[in-house]
Image (tube, coloured by chain):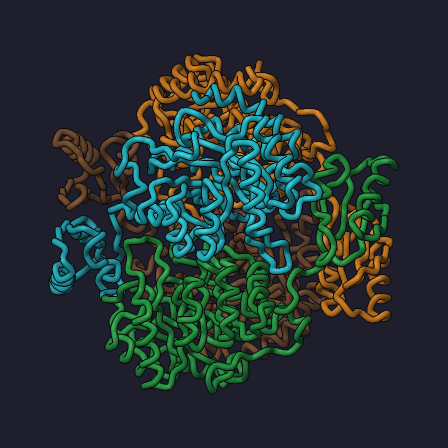
Chain colours: A brown, B orange, C cyan, D green
């Protein structure tokens, strides 16, 4: 911790602060600057009592307190210098091969799901997405088919060989969802629902953790820490847009997260351009940017008839558009050094 | 729904759209404007299939689709033109009397809690706050005393007569928390954890719903709708600051929510200046603004020794400062026409 | 400056950094912490070469660089511990007396302006606002009456004795506007138009500096520094709402700026609830909050017939509503210890 | 305009509104919906008096007023369905060839500039950037070399054949800057300084208009409208990151602007990854994303020795890194169908 004192502090005030720092288990190190005194407090910020409250107790003496250590450990690149990969069935996400997860926003019917599954498989996807439990802004909107939806996903997996990713909404469903899913998705609204993260982690299944609507990257990494520290090392981060003042798009997709997560963490990074833009007509361009910048996978909403989708119809692409996106991505995937 | 067509649409394209609107159960109403055609689609947006996807299916024809109905019902002022009040023990929140809920961020020990409870009671508070289950950004931070904390809160209630408000973090704890609490708090990070909202509502206890970090007011009202539509009409909204680009304060307290919630809804509005600013030195001014603008209650973090608080020490005020705030608020409470 | 080194730095790397710090004119002070080395670089950050680029030159060695000095000087409370006041005609803004500046968004006609001036004067305002040069988002919108508007303002001053505040949009108009205005307003869109700030400061007239739409408080204070460092000490800060994700209001009025500006600076703080909310129906509540929190003055848009206003009609209050606001503010102004 | 009335409006209230709409020059068109009445007001919103104030005059009757027309004309794709190109010397920006503009943040010395110019030319850039007039947050920071900087830029053009782009800060410098520059840059802080936009447009030089820190896309297009409506059709939009809550990067680069500007406007879109991220280590990845998504050009800050840059050293890349970026971009430029 670095403690910056106000200008014109008396010797007595300095002594008071030094005593307090020692009392809390740190060794103070005084630097007399031109304009003010700065104290370095040496000790492990992760195990000692915080010094952040010094400014509250001594408002006349302390100007600011700044931490110097990063707060995340297990997700950090320092803890695991090489890229980690997540095994899903026969696939490794985060390795040489680029992956596409695709499927409808909500599972609506057997026909809708199986048609989509066959089409996305044919176009090159390796994982099928589909919501069985849906978090909806209004209680009057379609809330998902529940377990029936999970069974349809299992059927689609059996028919196509695609792995399954689906969202977990409730601690009480953790076991149920883990029974059917190959990857458990934690949605943006639950990204800091730590009880849910712990319940998901404990199933042992790979976890895809979406970034919250207004989550700082540090908070996102720390939410991931809840997964790794509960003995589950199969974690993927998924950027899906943050909330800003712009209204042309539903969210602002922050593609800078790709190089940043690669730099700070060893976990794979997945991009969701459908939620990211909230507009089907922007999905293709977003996918291209994500591939070129080094993402490990994409998560794309695809529906056989977006106009009649029971949820988020404006952001789902049709089967034809999806196939076209996959074709246009190919040269970029190669140019980015992936398969 | 209002459907705006692109300029220069052919007769045939117009017919296509009209047919589609009728197919979805609405009666179209065509207005030929100077620059383009606008269609009003008459029918209940809450019961009919959405028209929002028209832009996706017919991107060459449709420019934009705008809803005209509000999406919330039970929380709206239209549904209940008079102010509703929430009964907590002998108190009515939302009525003539102004209420203050105060106490530590986390329950830490019997001594800490009972000292605080006695002091805030003496200064005029009617509800004691205190976290037993704490949502923490990092898994390595103090997570609360759990049930032991709840028991201490119950003891403080017995000794002081103060009602108790505490946060619910997990659906699995809903019954346990309801056993001890007089008001269940849903925190900002769980404001769109709908499963938790439903579990909390079903306990029948009054609910204080904090605004999420980046929640639009419409979304907040709709989250409240999850409470009322689960047969619990004791709902209070609590503004606690939204996340913006400003870094001087931890959050930006949006006091305009006071007149807005009063206008849109019949439910009481509570202001939390401690989370709102994240700085103890700004709490007093924030409280004054909230009272003058017509808030029904305040939720203030108070600690006998903020410097040694186990969580959020920088935003908790001392017992002395709290008493001083209460004294300075009195003339403003009267000037605002409250008791 | 504080320079945090990465973990596991070699002795040689440390020497490299120390040499570089000395080369740039600072005295390094090494602290060996548990996890990493931290260096305090002693020297005046305002006069020496910046160390912020150390992380770029030595990315393998340096983790982060943190400044410890505040960047603003003349506007800071440290530079001038007592409140400063701004003299406008016979009035002192920032002193014991609370001031209200009111008038139309745009000057439209003699009748409109004189009617408004007489009414706001009768209700207790001391300054008349009115835009002669208007910054409009679209080039097709009304751009203001220009010099003709200034002449009308002068006439209104002559008739009522009210002082005049009006916006300066162009360096080329600085002398012209200064000829007529008692206070020069710098609008939100020009808050970091430093050339305009310098031109305005050099007229010697009092300056009211609005906060930019997404301006951090530190940047606002530094923009104020452009005024004071150009030998004009009559500066007022004016909060008018920041841009956030919320769409219910046009902007989010950040009332926490009142205690913050009072703490960081000696200059008066004025609140503009009209721009702040963008809705006439929220103005009264916002005014009350501002008074209770200690603002020095209000800037309110008033129009004899808001429905027919040539700009921003939705946020201007009528003469009757203005008079009512002034009546309701009186007890709060007294409760806040002002006249 | 669409006017939504409140539920339960009387016949008399309806008549009042209809009369008012006609009075303002629109033809009303009534639609009786299930929950409320909606009125379409037919007439040109760009030439008639606004109806937006109806809600203020008749708050008991009108719930909301929604515009249906887009406010921008000349910059819109509707006005000019094909891509427009901007001629700069022998180059066409916005055509088949992809362009890179590169150079230092500030012009510091002849040696610094000529070294950079030669290196960026050798690596494939076609335009040299360099600031002679610098907008700085603090008045105590380096403000640029002024005309001396412009002369150095002209010398670099003469030696290398590169075109020159430099920022215009003051209306008073418009002629001076136009004498030296091939492209005039309007910076983010001045993006809504309309007087400056008009002065720049009137020089007849190509204009590169950066997006303001918190500018909505519609506002950006309307600011561009100020250029085109002042008879200058050589306009380029430049995305340089918006301000959000995230602090890991200086700004959040919004790459979705590439497909959006292409859809809404005919003008070229340029991406500035240096300002966009504020971190040299993220520039390469950002460039790749921009190329893959269809940007027309890049604007990159390059310095022979970023550590000693007089401004923004943390975001400038070295000559070596720049050459490497250019090499790695080549396959992506081809994959994106550009030269």
Q: Position of residue B217 (x, y in %)?
A: 60, 41
**For residue C109, above or below residue B156:** below
Residue A87 visible, this orientation: no
Q: Is residue C286 above or below residue B12?
A: above
- A311 in relation to C211, above or below: below
Residue at horizontal 37 percent and vertical 31 percent from the top: B280
Image quadrant holding the C terminus of chain B, namely top right
Q: What residue lies at 27% left-to-right and 44% top-to-bottom?
A: C73
Depth check: give the residue in front, B283 or D117.
Answer: D117
Q: Residue at x 64, y 42 (%)?
A: C110
Taking the spot 29% from the left edge, 48% from the top edge, the residue there is C71
Query: Is C254 left or right of B36, judged from the image as shown?
Result: left
Q: Considering depth in this image, is D175 or A39 the residue closer to the camera?
A: D175
Q: Position of residue B12 (x, y in %)?
A: 85, 71
Foreground residue among C181 and D95: C181
**The quarter of the displayed image where residue B261 is located:** top right
The tally of labels here is 0
* Apparent side of residue A309 relative to residue A284 in the rendered image (left or right): right
Q: Quadrant of residue A104?
A: bottom right
Q: Quadrant of residue D327?
A: bottom left
Pinpoint residue B165: horizontal percent, then vertical percent: 50, 25
> Which residue is nearer to you in this view: C50 or D334?
C50
Question: Where residue B215 appears, x then y in whole percent?
Answer: 55, 44
Asked if residue A135 can be seen in this view, the reply is yes
């Amino acid at each position: 911790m670095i403690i910056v004192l106000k200008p014109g502090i008396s010797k007595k005030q300095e002594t008071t602060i030094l005593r307090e720092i020692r009392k809390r288990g740190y060794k103070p190190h005084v630097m007399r600057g031109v304009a003010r005194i700065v104290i370095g407090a040496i000790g492990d910020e992760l195990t000692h009592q915080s010094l952040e409250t010094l400014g509250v107790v001594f408002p006349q003496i302390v100007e600011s307190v700044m931490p110097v250590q990063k707060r995340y450990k297990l997700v950090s690149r320092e803890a695991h210098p090489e890229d980690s990969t997540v095994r899903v069935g026969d696939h490794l996400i985060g390795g040489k091969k680029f992956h596409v997860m695709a499927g409808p926003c909500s599972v609506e019917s057997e026909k809708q799901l199986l048609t989509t599954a066959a089409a996305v498989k044919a176009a090159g996807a390796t994982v099928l997405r589909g919501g069985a439990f849906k978090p909806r802004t209004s209680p009057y909107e379609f809330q998902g088919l529940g377990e029936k939806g999970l069974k349809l996903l299992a059927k689609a997996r059996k028919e196509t060989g695609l792995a399954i990713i689906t969202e977990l909404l409730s601690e009480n469903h953790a076991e149920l969802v883990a029974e059917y899913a190959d990857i458990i998705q934690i949605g943006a609204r639950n990204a800091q629902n730590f009880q849910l993260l712990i319940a998901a982690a404990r199933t042992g299944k790979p976890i895809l953790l979406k970034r919250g609507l207004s989550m700082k990257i540090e908070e996102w990494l720390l939410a991931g820490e809840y997964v790794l520290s509960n003995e589950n090392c199969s974690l993927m981060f998924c950027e899906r847009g943050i909330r800003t003042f712009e209204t042309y798009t539903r969210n602002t997709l922050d593609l800078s997260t790709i190089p940043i997560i690669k730099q700070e963490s060893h976990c794979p990074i997945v991009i969701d351009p459908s939620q990211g833009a909230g507009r089907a007509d922007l999905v293709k361009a977003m996918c291209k940017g994500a591939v070129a910048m080094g993402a490990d996978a994409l998560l794309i909403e695809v529906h056989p008839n977006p106009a009649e989708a029971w949820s988020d119809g404006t952001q789902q692409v049709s089967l034809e558009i999806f196939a076209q996106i996959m074709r246009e991505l190919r040269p970029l995937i190669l140019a980015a050094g992936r398969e």
